[in-house]
Image (cartoon, grey):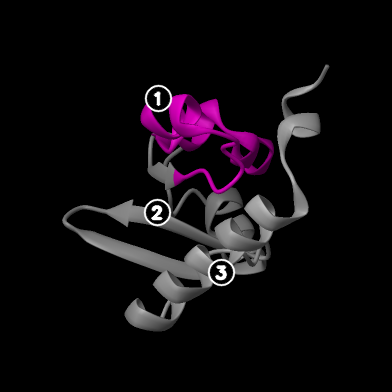
Amino acid sequence: MSRFSLLSGCSIDASVRFIQSIEEEFSVILMDKMNVTYRNKDHIQYIPLKDFRKMAKKKQIPSSVIVFNNLVLDKGEYETQWEVPAASSWHSRYF
């Protein structure tokens, strides 16, 4: 049995509503995979994926930059894989 077969439509809907409430409260978009959020020194940057890709290819962003991995599936992954170096994430293909 996969981890997803245990989820009901109601629990998924509740999770999506929770994320949407965070997006609304903080004026951010968390569920759009076409954007990248990363740490730039003491600031959080949020840019379109196409711009992140260009900056990475031009070496304006190092592969060690910390990105926020919106593909985490559960609390365990959130605790260990939410903030990771780009080189250790799906973003690595751009470096």
Q: Mark 3 points at which residue?
A: 17
* Label 2 crowd (10 A; few <14 / some 14-19 / many >=20): many
Which residue appears farthest toward the top when viewing the image?
Answer: 1
Task: Report the quarter where the N terminus lies.
Answer: top right
Secondary structure under tag 3 reads helix
Question: Is 82 contained in the magenta span?
Answer: yes
- Please state which of the two labelled residues, at mark 2 or mark 3, is closer to the viewer: 3
Q: Is residue 35 above or below residue 73?
A: below
Question: Is 71 contained in the magenta span?
Answer: yes
- Amino acid under disc 2: Tyr
Occupied quadrant, residue 80: top left
Magenta-highlighted residues? 68-95
Residue 63 lies left or right of residue 10; in this view the side is left
Secondary structure under tag 1 reads helix
- Amino acid under disc 3: Arg
Task: Report the quarter where the C terminus lies.
Answer: top right
How far from the left and from the top, in percent, is residue 88?
52, 26
Q: Earlier in the sequence, mark 2 or mark 1?
A: 2
Name which residue lies at 72% across and 39% down.
Answer: 7
Q: Nearest the camera: 83 or 15?
A: 15
Q: Earlier in the sequence, mark 3 or mark 1?
A: 3
Q: How far apart are marks 2 and 3 (CA)?
A: 24 Å
Q: Name the residue under label 2.
A: 38
Name which residue lies at 52% across and 30% down.
Answer: 87
Q: Is residue 8 above or below residue 24?
A: above
Q: Name the residue under label 1.
A: 80
